[in-house]
Structures are given as structure tokens and as C-alpha cells.
Amino acid sequence: MSTIEHDEITPSEDFIKGFNEGYILAKFSRELTKTDMPNSDRSKGFAKGMMQYEVEKKLEHSMSRFTQDRNDTDHDLTKDKDRDKER
């Protein structure tokens, strides 16, 4: 049975700083995120922060498409209903 070390559960302060920096830069300045960084907790956090932003952006886009499609369907049903009343 293996034991889980504390570092595997709780990210270091450097990782958290890097994560936040990566997330913010991915959101506001993509060209600055293409720099090479040394292999450290902060750079790992930076990469994970960028990935997290991309995941949220894709999810937001998917959800907006879903609600837009749903609204379009509801709207079309309403138009059809009104057409039946006119006949």
C-alpha cells in the first residue's frame, strides 16, 4: 500500500503563483504565454493555469452554443404556434 505525500495533495505556493499567472496571461495576453520556462513548480503551475483557462473558455463556448440552440428551438416553436392561430 503506497502512501500519499503531503506535496501531492497541496500545491506549493510557487505552483499556485504560476497557476494564477498562467491563467491571467492566457486570458489577456496569449503571446506572452509562449515563453520557455525552467522546469519548476511555478512553471508547472503556469502551464496548468493556461490549460485551465482554455478548458473554461471551451466549456463556456459549448454552453453558449447549447443555450443559443435551445433558444432558437423555443423561438421556432412559438412562431409555428402563432402561424396556426392565423389560419
Image (cartoon, rainbow, N blue to C red):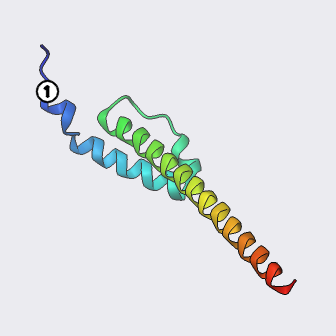
13 horizontally vs 5: left or right: right
Q: Tell me what residue is drawn at x 35 percent, y 45 percent.
A: 18
Say which of 46 and 64 sits in front: 64
Q: Quadrant of the C terminus?
A: bottom right
Q: Residue furthest right?
A: 87
Q: Amino acid at mark 1?
A: Glu
7 horizontally vs 44: left or right: left
Whether residue 17 is situated above or below residue 79 in the rendered picture: above
Q: Quadrant of residue 77?
A: bottom right
In the rendering, at what x and y percent does residue 33 appear? 52, 45
Whether residue 58 is situated above or below residue 15 in the rendered picture: below
76 horizontally vs 36: left or right: right
Q: Residue furthest top?
A: 1
Q: Tell me what residue is drawn at x 65 percent, y 64 percent.
A: 68
Whether residue 6 is situated above or below residue 19 in the rendered picture: above
Q: Quadrant of residue 73?
A: bottom right
Say which of 73 and 85 sits in front: 85
In the rendering, at what x and y percent does residue 72 appear? 70, 67
In the rendering, at what x and y percent does residue 55 appear? 49, 46
Q: Quadrant of the N terminus?
A: top left
Provide the residue designation for mark 1: 5
Q: Quadrant of residue 86?
A: bottom right
Q: Residue furthest bottom?
A: 86
Q: Tell me what residue is drawn at x 35 percent, y 40 percent.
A: 45
Q: Tell me what residue is drawn at x 59 percent, y 56 percent.
A: 61
Number of numbered markers:
1
**Element under label 1?**
loop
